Image (cartoon, grey):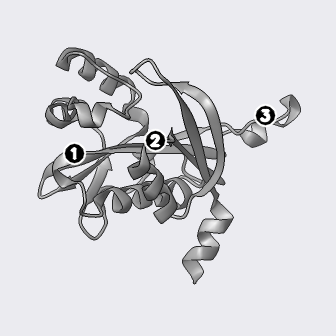
């Protein structure tokens, strides 16, 4: 089974978005909205300058997918293939068996269902495109919008972890973990 985003046939199309792998020049295109406080409230990486953002973006291109609407990037996400945890003697069979997905949207398109559409496409890419057996996503418990998206695309809430995540506000926040097995995703797709 294919194990890299670059091996898939691009672009992909959803009802309202064109998806393709991220490119180095996309960093500057997403910077005007990616740096906004309402976006940075929940993102992992805070880049203080465009140059720092471009360097971070370049390092994440192997797992980066962007969503375009009318030729403009309105969503950025990741499908990060990872090795599943295993006992040492099973490490080879656990290699590349799961993926973490994540997404960020331009606030100008919030409220239109594009986050759900984009996240569902990332889930499909991980399972159908890359052949992983398990997909995970996580968020701060206070990030209600991400939690709703995870639930809408069929991810199962697997855990809430008390004050396990240090937010850039200086507060320790609860974190939440969601996941779905490929077998569950395929079963749902049949119905």
Mark 1 element type: loop
Q: Residues within 10 Å of mark 3 (few under 14, many from 20)?
A: few
Position of 51 relative to 128 (above/below): above
Q: Quadrant of residue 12?
A: bottom left
Q: Quadrant of the C terminus?
A: bottom right
> Measuring 61% from the left and 52% from the top, which residue is drawn there?
179
Position of 126 relative to 160 (above/below): below
Mark 2 element type: loop
Nearest-to-viewer mark from 2 and 3 = 2
Q: Quadrant of residue 13?
A: bottom left
Work out whether mark 1 precedes mark 3 in sequence or the reverse, and give the earlier one. Answer: 3
Mark 3 element type: helix
Q: Position of residue 129 (x, y in %)?
A: 50, 57
Q: Quick check: 111 left or right of 101?
A: left
Q: Quadrant of residue 121?
A: bottom left
Q: Position of residue 7 (x, y in %)?
A: 44, 48
CA distance for labels 2 and 3? 35 Å
Pick the front one: 172 or 145: 172
Work out whether mark 2 precedes mark 3 in sequence or the reverse, and give the earlier one. Answer: 3
Position of 77 relative to 19 (above/below): above
Residue furthest to the bottom in view is: 191
Q: Residues within 10 Å of mark 2 (few under 14, many from 20)?
A: few
Label drawn at residue 106? 1
Label drawn at residue 142? 2
Which residue matches tag 3? 91
CA distance for labels 1 and 3? 39 Å
């Amino acid at each position: 089974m294919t194990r890299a985003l670059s091996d898939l046939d691009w672009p992909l199309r959803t009802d309202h978005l064109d998806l393709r792998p991220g490119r180095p020049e996309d960093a500057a295109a997403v910077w005007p909205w990616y740096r906004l406080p309402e976006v940075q409230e929940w993102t992992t990486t805070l880049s203080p300058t465009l140059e720092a953002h471009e360097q971070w973006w370049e390092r994440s291109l192997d797992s980066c997918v962007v969503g375009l609407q009318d030729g403009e990037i309105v969503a950025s996400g990741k499908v990060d293939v990872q090795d599943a945890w295993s006992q040492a003697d099973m490490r080879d069979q656990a290699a590349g068996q799961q993926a973490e997905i994540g997404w960020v949207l331009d606030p100008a398109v919030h409220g239109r269902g594009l986050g759900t559409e984009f996240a569902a496409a990332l889930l499909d890419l991980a399972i159908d495109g890359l052949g992983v057996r398990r997909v995970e996503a996580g968020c701060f418990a206070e990030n209600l919008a991400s939690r709703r998206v995870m639930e809408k695309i069929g991810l199962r809430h697997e855990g809430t972890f008390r004050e396990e995540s240090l937010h850039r506000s200086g507060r320790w926040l609860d974190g939440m973990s969601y996941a779905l097995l490929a077998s569950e995703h395929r079963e749902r797709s049949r119905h």
